Image (spheres, rainbow, N blue to C red):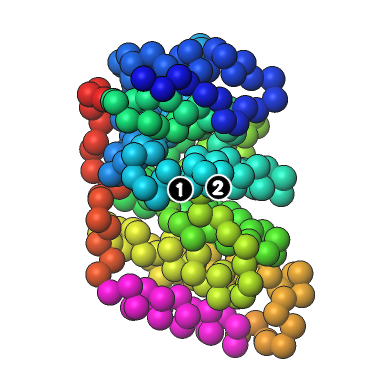
Amino acid sequence: MTAARVIKLAAGEDGSAWSDALSRPNWRDGAELLKRDGGVSVWRAELLGRVVVVKCWSLDRLKRRLQVIVGATPAVRQWRGAAWLQEHEIPTADPFVIVRTTLDGQLTECLVMRALIGETVLDHLAGGDLTIRQEHALARLIGRQIAQITLHNRFNRDHKPSNLIVTRTGDSTPIVAVIDSVAIRRATRSLDHLCSMLADLAIEPTGCGCPPRRTLAMRCVLEALAGMVSDGQPKDKDPATLRNEVWAAVMSVMARRGNLTPRIDPLADVRRTDG
């Protein structure tokens, strides 16, 4: 049995309390399993009197053990990504602690984050529960978010709708928060990376049978480009030419992916209480 160890801790948090809570094998009793994908599981649980999301990565594979050595495990990368998003005022789930412990007999890293209230963008697309006005407002928010990330020389390699949650501020203003920041990377080709993120937004729902309408997708594209152009990038293209080139690039990315059906259906009901 490996003793629990705190790897990262947010200011004001009690590392010992979190370590003790996640060392108890029954902390998942009554918790809600949100996702399971190979060596990764995601739970919504009540711990230390708070509703939190706990993302757990098994470290039993060689690749994960090497990542431990260099300090670049998925949990640590998500922590760094969240810190970068917060620094640039892009909404995300606040991380509280990373604890390395033993779970189901395997060395595991658990990242604890604030649970956000709301549905994912994919849930809204699949549910059809928004009015057309609300859909276009949401598309504009996502387009601005992509522009903001790109203009800070970053891109998200996994900017898909199931990783974006629609929540609200204290005055009920809707915002779109990034709930998976593991894949945030430096961008060397801003426009290419912008197109890649735009394509990710369409690939997942298309593969799940709920593709965004063309007008909705174009709204997001136009908003992302408006954010880029307002900052003077790129400087050598008129808006219509740029719009057409970006749209063609997004369609090209989707065509190269071939079969868009996700390996694990993010809309499937995986809720159960077993660990």
The residue segment tinted magenta is: 241-258
Of 126 and 263, the residue lying toward us: 263
- Which residue position is annotated with label 2? 70
Q: With respect to residue 213, does 77 lie above or below?
A: above
Q: Secondary structure at mark 1?
A: helix
- Which residue position is annotated with label 1? 66
Q: Which residue corresponds to the image point at 70% horizontal and 80% vertical from the top-left? A: 234
Of 33 and 165, the residue lying toward us: 33
Q: Residues within 10 Å of mark 1 (few under 14, many from 20)?
A: few
Name the main secondary structure of what is drawn in magenta.
helix
Residue 247, image x, y percentages = 48, 78
Of 138 and 79, the residue lying toward us: 79
Q: CA distance from mark 1 to mark 2?
A: 7 Å
Q: Secondary structure at mark 2?
A: helix
Q: Give the residue type at disc 1.
A: Leu
Q: Which residue corresponds to the image point at 25% horizontal and 50% vertical from the top-left? A: 265
Quarter of the rendering occupied by the N terminus: top left
Q: With respect to residue 102, does 144 lie above or below?
A: below
Answer whether residue 24 is visible to the viewer in this image. yes
